[in-house]
Amino acid sequence: MHGRLSRRSVLAATAALPLAATAACTGGGEDNTPAARGGSGGRRPVRVTFWSALRGSQEVVDAFNSTHDRVQVDFQQIPSGGQGGYAKLSNAARAGNAPDVATIEYPQVPGFAIDGVARDITDLVGDDLRAKLLP
């Protein structure tokens, strides 16, 4: 089913941004010390990197960024998994340059989890957001 996005893939990409925002609000590796703060209100927005091969991701990111001041998403389009995207993600993780959020297909999750690329963020997701997600 190459070339055509499934409903599940689109939903996964759409769900990734709120999760990115949730992770970012916890500090997610961003330097949030007083010296690093700046901009309006004395704080720079938290920056979250997001990689995806899904078409339409840039538009979702643009819409998110236009309505959020405290969290901004830096998007990078990558090739689909079989065309090098998964290799790029694995290599970036090994080099310590992995994005904060990336879309991967469900069958790939166990392999990425074993390699330490995919991480359990259950503790970073608040009860309100958890109630909105599927089990």
Image (tube, rainbow, N blue to C red):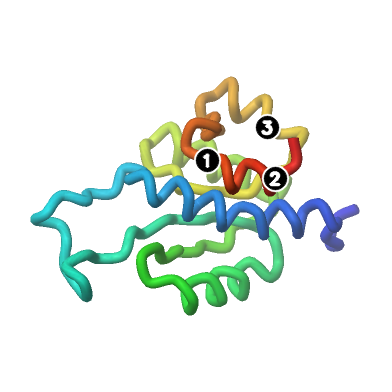
Mark 1 vs mark 2: which is more N-terminal? 1
Q: Can you give x and y, in whole percent of width and height, for residue 37 in the image?
A: 16, 61
Provide the secondary structure element on which disc 1 rests.
Answer: loop
**Are the residues at dot 1 and dot 2 in contact (C-beta closer than 8 Å)?**
yes
Identify the residue shown where x is 22% and y is 51%.
Answer: 32
Label 3, label 1: how far apart the Cα atoms are: 18 Å
Location of mark 3 (residue): 109
In this view, the residue farthest toward the left is 35
Which of pointers 3 and 1 indicates the residue nearer the eye?
1
Q: Quadrant of residue 27?
A: top left
**Relative to residue 39, is residue 31 depicted above or below?**
above
The residue tagged 1 is 125
Check disc 2 and report the residue beneath it. Answer: 133
- Foreground: disc 3 or disc 2: 2
Given contact means CB atoms under 8 Å apart, are the residues at marks 3 and 2 in contact? no
The amino acid pointed to by label 3 is Val
Q: What type is the residue that disc 2 sits on?
A: Leu
Estimate how packed mark 2 is, as few (under 14), some (14 to 19) or many (20 or more) residues with alpha carbons within 10 Å. Answer: few
